[in-house]
Image (spheres, helix red, strand yellow):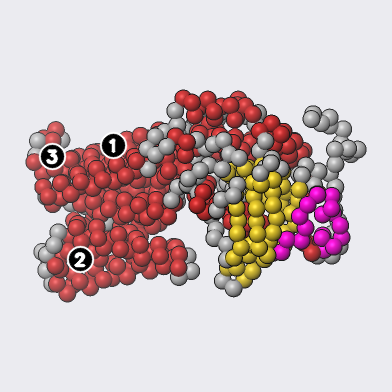
Amino acid sequence: MIEAFGSPFMQKAFIAGILVSVLTGIISVFIVLRKMSFIGAGISHAAFGGIAIGFFTGINPLLTAIIYSIVIAFGIESTSRKGRIAEDVSIGIFYSVSMAIGIAIVSMSKSYNVDLFGYLFGNILAITKGEILLTLITFMAVTSVIIIFLKELFLSTYNEELAKVSGIRVKFLNTLFLVALSVSIVISIRVVGIIMVSALLVIPGAAARLFAKSLLSMIVISCVVAFVSVIAGLLISYAYDIASGASIVITSAVIFFISLLFKKKI
Amino acid sequence: MSSAIIIEDLSVNIKGKDILKNINFTLEEGHFLGIVGPNGGGKTTLIKVILGLLTPSSGAVRIFGRNPELLLGKEEIFGYLPQHLNIDPNFPASAVDIVLMGRYKKAGFFKWPGKKDMEKAIGCMSLMGVENLKDIQYSQLSGGQQQRVSIARALAGDPRILVLDEPSTGIDVVGQEDFYHLLKGLQKKMNLTILMVSHDIGTVTAYVDEISCLNINLYYHGNPLGALNENVMTSLYGKNVDLLMHTDVCDKCERLRTP
């Protein structure tokens, strides 16, 4: 398994994997505390529509998916706010329609050489240098936004009204977080795949919440869980030729259930 | 003495429905006001307008002479205790972390509260008698303890007006009375203006300086004992209301009350 670190494919996979794990580790904390796991799952499935548009137009699918998923995230938000529909209903509609559009586009384009399986379940071998760069830029943008607004995010997670009274622009902050979430989801698709990215958005934060006594410790534990899951998952994927998304998610689930057992003993 | 809150001809109308209608009152600085009335009577809406979170349909609100919506985010005047603080059982914050949230604004953008803020936070906790709980996880505290910690949080920002929305929910009667005594003490010690929404008119009248009886219209504003007449009560709650009075002389319980 040591030779995995020497292969250029795997080196790229590890770089992307490390960036993605820290990114989802941080985002996951707020997904769990703000109870947004369903919107995370919704946006990631909806991203499939954006990826299909990329196939069709010849633009890098990750780029089209980023724009598409931001639009969908706002669509979910505004229909559930203005249209007086419950948010889960709105998510259910948007993500299934997006996937339908995606499948329609893929079947129309008749290009069977597209790596559909890779996008759905993660394919580390397909990561290009340009995508590593895109991942790095996203990583820096999202982590700095969260670090800058960390205490405002924490206060508005604790209680939105309280945050408003102390002068925090909660609406702006929610929008910013939604964009950060959408971008992080799309960036993680190469490594874990559309179907399984939502697990990486929930499991690290959920495991961290079992033990964390403060926000900072929750972020650290969550990042460690995500990091270990991604690295171990990538190695397993390399050794047994399994789709990386599957091995990463299974690893993180094992960590989660072991944590749960430990928590009960404490 | 300046007026902390002036409300003139205030009406709030949401989607064609009157929530508040022609409300007028003034609250002087350092006074303790109780707002009572039935559910759906507009108590929480009135608080939101005063805090600057909701724009009134007509009329004016002045907080120390200024528009509350413009004060929002500029100056810290309010210490606020929201009605619902249903907190996640694993929320990652100790009691003192919660109190420190009251210092976020003072700490400034992109800066976490420092040593001075920590001293202030601990000071407010000891004022509320919860200093010994500071390192315990907030979510593991009892309802009454959480409430005291939350008030310490509200006080940590050095507010001039303390706004409490139904603070006694989920606390037993004996605990409630201790709590009102504590508030009364704060009011005197810090010259704090206090605005408290409550559905428990019987208890509130024993502690507040003024009372507002609200059910869309303001049926009464003034001395608390004056609210206890049949006409006001009928306007608020309908006919046949039995009132349970609480005064400082209590012959049912033998607990000694410390002033």
Q: Please report, as a chain letter, where disc 3 is located.
A: A
List the residue tagged with mark 2.
A52
User: How many residues crowd around disc 3 within 10 Å: few (fewer than 14), some, or many (20 or more)?
Assistant: some
Screen quadrant of the N terminus of chain A: top left
Q: Which residues are magenta?
A: B216-234
Q: Amino acid at mark 2?
A: Ala
Q: Residues within 10 Å of mark 2 (few under 14, many from 20)?
A: many
Pair 2/1: label in front: 2
Under circle 3, the secondary element is helix
Chain where mark 2 sits: A
Q: Does residue A49 appear left or right of residue B27 in this picture?
A: left
Query: What subunit carries mark 1?
Result: A
Residue A182 horizontal/vertical position (percent): 30, 55
Q: Residue at x 74, y 54 (%)?
A: B212
State how far apart marks 3 and 1 are (Cα): 16 Å
Q: Which residue is mark 1?
A: A228
Q: Do marks 2 and 1 both belong to one polypeptide chain?
A: yes
Q: Is residue A259 visible?
A: no
Which badge, 3 or 1, comes first in the chain's sequence? 3
Give the residue displayed 69% in from the left and 52% down from the top.
Answer: B26
User: On the image, numbered disc 3 is attached to which residue?
Assistant: A11
Say above or below: B104 vs B4: above
Does the stretch in magenta take in B221?
A: yes
Nearest the eye: B96 or A51: B96
Give the mark nearer the N terminus: 3 vs 2. Answer: 3
Separation of marks 3 and 2 at Cα, in angstroms: 27 Å
Amino acid at pointer 3: Gln
From the viewer's perspective, tell me whether residue A8 is left or right of residue A44: left
Q: CA distance from mark 2 to mark 1?
A: 31 Å
The reply to whether label 3 and label 2 mark residues of one chain is: yes
SS class, disc 2 = helix
